Amino acid sequence: MSTNNVNLNLNDFLKFKDNGKSISDLLNEMIAKIGENLIISDLNVFDNNEAKINYYIHNPYRKNIGKIVSAVFYSTDEENDEVKIFSKNLCMHVAVSKPEAMDINKLPTELIESEKKIQEEMIKDSGKPSNVIEKILLGKMNKFYSEVTLLNQNFVIDNDKTVKEAISNFNSSNSFVLNNYILISL
């Protein structure tokens, strides 16, 4: 099965056939086999033939089956053991930290606005002047971004660095571009 249509929607994807069975049929078979309800709620098609993939399964209870699965899609000029280990560490980070988006500009506007309203209400109740409230709000929103965006999270392997800084440091001796990630959690 392959497609070059980066605008593919979820319904069309579920109709694709692999070895004579639709993706929807294969998904139903998997649900019956593992006894867990699986729902595909979002679909991303990547148009990058050069991308590499590494994945991590947290606490697998059968071969290639676990309650948390993460994968990273990356590009590199050199696929070596260091790149494989680094990409696996990023997968583990994603599984542990459960980011909502790659970076701030990829966060849903509704999520940002909702968090901003919550923080504003909490700060207003403190009775502080408006110029102080704005600075406190900025700090709280930056903390929120550092918790929910992958590149701004502290890297679980080295908490003194963000993921973005860890990638930058890694690139001083290797070639690595993080293209995207996925997280599946049952």
Image (cartoon, rainbow, N blue to C red):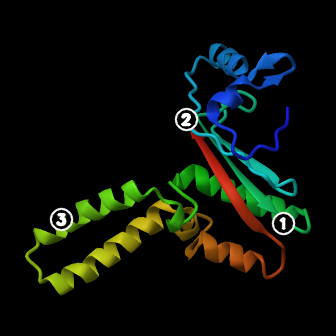
- Residue identified by numbered label 3: 122
Q: Residues within 10 Å of mark 2 (few under 14, many from 20)?
A: few
Query: CA–CA distance between discs 2 and 3?
Result: 32 Å
Sequence-wise, the earlier of marks 2 and 3 is: 2
The quadrant in which residue 11 appears is: top right
The amino acid pointed to by label 2 is: Ser
- Residue identified by numbered label 2: 41
Picture coordinates of residue 91 (x, y %)?
A: 67, 53
Which secondary structure, mark 1?
helix
Give the left or right position of residue 50, taking residue 34 as reference: right
Query: CA–CA distance between discs 1 and 3?
Result: 45 Å
Q: Residues within 10 Å of mark 1 (few under 14, many from 20)?
A: few
Answer above or below: position of 185 versus 175.
above
Numbered tag placed on residue 71 in the rendering: none
> Residue at 85% of width from left, 16% of height from top?
20
> Residue at 20% of width from left, 84% of height from top?
132
- Residue identified by numbered label 1: 82
Residue most extreme to the bottom: 131
Query: CA–CA distance between discs 2 and 1?
Result: 33 Å
Answer above or below: position of 37 versus 107.
above
Which of 123/9 is in front? 9
